[in-house]
Amino acid sequence: MSRKTLLILAAAAAAALSGMTRAQDHIWDGTTNIWGDQAHWTPTGVPDTTGENAFITGGTVTLDASYGIGTLNLTGGAIDGTFNLTANTLNWTYGNMSDNGSTTVTGDATVNANNGYLSLYGRTLNLQGNTTQSGINGYGPYLQNAATLNNSGSYAISDDSDINT
């Protein structure tokens, strides 16, 4: 390859890489409020695109509209409301999803009940990708109050985990 060709390829690669951006992470402040209130997210702004991830570690986030995001990290607290949440991926290690709306995960999901309580209360959880679930002593998501778990992908349960009703 000529030097000119290598320089052109290097410039093209640099241009392509400069267009790549990392997803924006938004962290909920642990209060009870609506998803659409940007003052409760850090950095300020509402996660509402697939290029944005939501981290919820406490409090209750009520869906005041339907949202689509990149990754939902639910490690505490609760998501409720009658609207729908769509995420590309899910990491669920603690907390609740409730009310009559739905949460849809279009890609991979990790459900880890080793550290505590996972509750699906009246809500529909749609899993469309590869889901892995782990837990100890029979722990796993609790489906209560007509909650529904729909799986159209693969669902692998490891360890001593279970789906509880």
Image (cartoon, rainbow, N blue to C red):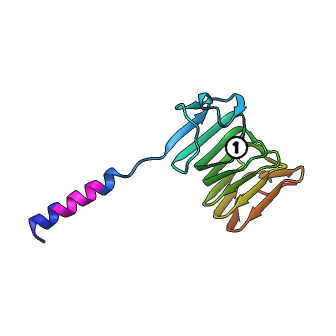
Does any portion of residue 160 appear in the rendered image?
no
The outermost residue toward the front is: 65
Residue at (79%, 57%) from the top-left corner?
Answer: 162
Q: Quadrant of the C terminus?
A: bottom right
Q: Residue 87, position in %: x, y?
A: 62, 53
Q: What SS does tag 1 mark?
A: loop
Residue at (35%, 52%) from the top-left corner?
Answer: 19
- Is 10 colored magenta in this rendering? yes
Q: Quadrant of the N terminus?
A: bottom left
Relative side of 97 to 18, left or right: right
Residue at (27%, 59%) from the top-left corner?
Answer: 13
- In the image, the segment drawn in magenta is 8-15
- Is 32 colored magenta in this rendering? no
8 up-or-down from 86: above or below: below
Task: Residue 96: name its quadrant.
Answer: top right
The outermost residue toward the left is: 3
Query: Residue 121 versus residue 102: which sits nearer the camera?
Result: 102
